Amino acid sequence: MSETDDGNFMKQVVSVEYDTKPSPQQVAYAKDLARHRIVGQRCPECALTYVPGSGYCPICAVAIGADGHVELEARGTVTTFTVVNPVQYKGQQEKSPYVVAAILLDGAGVALGHQRLGEVEPDDVRIGMRVEVEWAEAGAANPIAHWGPNGEPDVPADQVQEHVL
Amino acid sequence: MAERCAVVGIGQTHHKKCRDDVSLAGLVREAAERALEDAELTFRDIDAVVIGTAPDIFEGVMMPELYLADALGATGKPIMRVHTAGSVGGSTAVVATHLITSRVHPRVLTVAFEKQSEGDTSWGLSGGRSGGTGAGGYFAPHIRSYIERSGAPAHVGPMVAVKDRQNALKNPYAHLQLPDISIESVEASPVQWAPIRRLESCPTSDGACAMVLSDEAGGKQAPRKPAWVHATAIRSELGFFPGRDPVNPQAGRDCAADVYQQAGISNPREDFDMIECYVPFSWYEPMWMENLGIADEREGWKLTESGATAIDGDIPVNCSGGVLSSNPIGASGMLRFAEAALQVRGLAGEHQVDGASLALGHAYGGAAQYYAMWVVSDRMP
């Protein structure tokens, strides 16, 4: 993978291409997301709502059935974030800095990690900032284009900062 | 009662950006020969070999353990590989220790390594897809949360970055040698993954570390003072679950509590003479000081700021220069364990803490979800 071919390094091409089989829960989540619906799963015991859900609560170790499915608004709060200055490895398409954030959707018990923020300068992003979804054009691989500020006043940081994940 | 375990030989390579003077086999052999030389033993004296390295995709060599057996004198002997992501160097030493304490083998060679120059870790971590953020991009939000929660002043991260690089100047094996580093130069370095600046990050390194471990009889006969292993522990937790706190992970707290209990340590801040812990990004020093119970929650930064973790402080941390100065990933955990052992043996050279008698070696890996620790002393347990 070295870019040099000077005799000290011999170039080897590594290709990793494989199919993974998504779980039925992941398939259902993706289908809903493509219809611009975010469906989480609420644990019947602890009442935490998982987005996306995996069909069970990993804390209580109980199944979450169809009666636990709940639709959430595509709106939430930034709990933490970073501004990534992308490292230029082979295959990297990102060229300029961008913001990835953990977003706690309203009513969710766990934050959605590694979400892209848009419509905001990196320096203006804050823990506690309110955001809503910007859907991608039909047919995009990821139905979520990014999340952007929705203009609501910030939530105090100390109310969300425990939700790092 | 379990057999006692002694560290009787320690060796490491000169860690560099690119060790193109040696193959992977040459790299591990260099460390192994130095450890054997320290112990005044040969490959013939070794009963089994335990090796560890980070995921294969980081250096592009699949199952290197098969190809390295020959270079490590393991032909016809048991050899096994341990695999726990970035903590692997520590876990590898723990597994090797258990082969001694369980009386399976009297003398074990353990080696951990990484040749980052032959691969591309950022590529490996992303699986070749665009949008990979690397380890720094993954840990940066956790660091931001730590700073937000603790109210730590912004200069604490740069302080760690400077301290560890100044320690590295005393360690001829350390990769980064930055005599002119200052708080100002760290603050002026580019922000790579906000709030992590480039000079607050570890380098990519080639390097290996090796140790010869022995039973009690071998420890007593060792030509140089051995380090006695008083406690070992490994813990893990899921990378993602509700309520998980990656800033102060439960698995790290449990791992520390286990080794303290085994070693009879009630006040780690008082009892340890030095700590060598896995700090790949500067802010992990105060974070781990809290996780290890050396400082109260949200107070770890005060320890750093007061100078207590400096080499002349009352609880020196990372006297070798740490991961911030050398990061051959697979070896980085074992280098922490080896530095703790070197210190209690009194063989750490210019970065020796005077009279160090009890030390902690610490490693972490994955999504801050794997932990390995050991407590070593110059006194036999």
Image (cartoon, coloured by chain):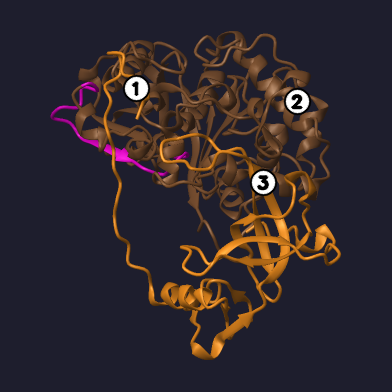
Q: Which chain is orange?
A: A
Q: Secondary structure at mark 1?
A: helix
Q: Secondary structure at mark 2?
A: helix
Picture residue at 65% right of the left edge, 25% below the top: B199
Circles 3, 1 touching at the beta carbon (< 8 Å): no
Label 3 sits on residue: A82
User: Quick one: label 2, few (<14), some, or many (20+) residues within 10 Å?
Assistant: some
Q: Is residue B103 visible?
A: no
- Chain letter of the residue carrying label 1: B
Q: Is residue B14 above or below residue B198?
A: above
- Chain letter of the residue carrying label 3: A
Q: Nearer the viewer, residue B10 or B367?
A: B367
Query: Which sits earlier in the primary sequence, circle 2 or circle 1?
Result: 2
Magenta part of the chain: B71-87
Question: Looking at the picture, how far across and down is residue A163, in whole percent?
Answer: 69, 61
Residue type at mark 3: give it. Thr
Question: Looking at the picture, how far across and down is residue B261, in whole percent?
Answer: 58, 46
Residue B84 belongs to magenta span: yes
Of tags 3 and 1, the one toward the viewer is: 3
Q: Main secondary structure of the magenta part?
A: loop
Q: CA distance from mark 2 to mark 1?
A: 49 Å
Label 1 sits on residue: B218
Picture residue at 47% right of the left edge, 15% below the top: B225
